Image (tube, rainbow, N blue to C red):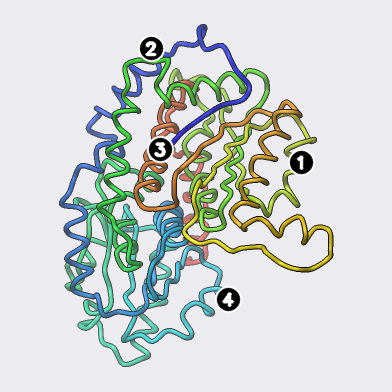
Amino acid sequence: MKLSFSPAWDSSKLPLTEWFTSFKETISNPSIGFFNVTERSELLSSCKEIHSKFKNKKSFVQVGIGGSSLGPEMLITALKKNDCEFQFINNIDPDKIHDQISGLNIEETLFYFVSKSGGTAETMAGFSIVSNLLLEKGISESEFKNHYVFATDPVKSELLDLGAELGVDCLEIPSNVGGRFSVLTPVGFLPALFAGLDCDALLKGANNLKKELLNEELDKNILLETASFLMNQKSLGRNQTVMMPYSSKLRDMGFWFVQLWAESLGKKLSLNGDTVFEGLTPIPGYGATDQHSQVQLFMEGPHDKVMIMLQVNKFENDYSLKNNFNASRLKMLSNHSLSGLMEAEFAGSLMALKEQERPYIHLEIPRNNEESMGEMILFLESLTAIMGSALNIDPFDQPGVELGKIYAFARLEERNQ
């Protein structure tokens, strides 16, 4: 993974040492586990055991919302290698759920219910729907253990209790890892294994990057470089962050990034308790498709955005554009490949952004594979954490989300009366 930035900026007046010290304290805090969870090999081992037990299942349905779905969806979309069918029940739209479950072969399907708290309303609603479906098919509660796996907090969770009652295998979501930081835990591992991914390579990519993230030469530390660039641009009024991979397979990375960035950095209160209404607004996009839609706004609209331009240097497949037609554009393309066209459009976008004086971060990966994915996940999670320090907010809570839940449950209680 390589990073470059435009334009140049002066970080000498930014408190890099303070941010770096805060980051190291954060990842050493026992209550915040995202950075060190990649070294807990037993978490992947437990998933491999479950995968071996249910490996003959041909369909995999993950029931979860937010961090219990977005990270796994990103992995499957980007890297899926086999014919296993996947569905992610990640919302409570009854029409969509009908489409997702109506054609399932229940005997060939594993249902994976994921909720760290074990009481997420949307996930429990999905559990009720699926359980009723199984009962309608003549499958008794005593047989649910042959169709279900749970992932939840290992200490206190309604789902954990339900698993014990039903004899359902339960995988651990570590208590010190928040949902939006949980993709490199059983939340993401089990679906990844069913999709044929090499989860050891995912962890290898993440763990190999740690040396760079902890580089004591602060002017060469990619984490501090990126944070200082973003803070410099924020001081100039650029408080929106566009995640734009030039890869259809990496499109869902944008949606995972949106939750990670928005839920972590959008905060009303500072660490000092002051009202600050802080945050950086994430925007998902992908190239080259969005060169024909959003890029017009990014190039000539409000000067309030920083682009993260993600480039895959080598695709796994390619197509020649050679042809004998007389149309001028077809003649121009004839000596090139499809990946060459993608590279040219990416390079053209960077040149145009530079000419328009639009700031960007150029993030390069050699290939879209498990090792690169592991690197990117840990990098973006770590960047989120250090941006919390730079913005003087807590990137690990979500009081705005919790408030909405409180009102939703109050409304349900009113209907019960």
Q: Residue at x 25, y 45 (%)?
A: 175
Residues tagged 3 and 2 counted as in contact (Cβ below 8 A):
no
Task: Give the quadrant of residue 196.
Answer: bottom left
Q: State which mark lies toward you, 1 or 4.
A: 1
Q: Residues within 10 Å of mark 3 (few under 14, many from 20)?
A: many
Question: Which residue carries the number 2 mark?
Answer: 17
- Mark pair 3, 2: CA separation: 19 Å
The mark nearer the N terminus, 2 or 4, is: 2
Q: Quadrant of the N terminus?
A: top left
Q: State which mark lies toward you, 3 or 4.
A: 3
Closest to the observer, 136 or 179: 179
The mark nearer the N terminus, 1 or 4, is: 4
Name which residue type carries label 3: Glu
Q: Residue at x 24, y 75 (%)?
A: 55
Q: Secondary structure at mark 1?
A: helix
- Mark pair 1, 4: CA separation: 33 Å
Residues tagged 1 and 4 counted as in contact (Cβ below 8 A):
no
Name which residue type carries label 2: Thr
Q: Secondary structure at mark 2?
A: helix
Question: Which residue carries the number 3 mark?
Answer: 381
- Mark pair 3, 4: CA separation: 34 Å
Q: Which mark is residue 297?
A: 1
Q: Secondary structure at mark 4?
A: helix
Question: Which residue carries the number 4 mark?
Answer: 95
- Mark pair 2, 1: CA separation: 36 Å
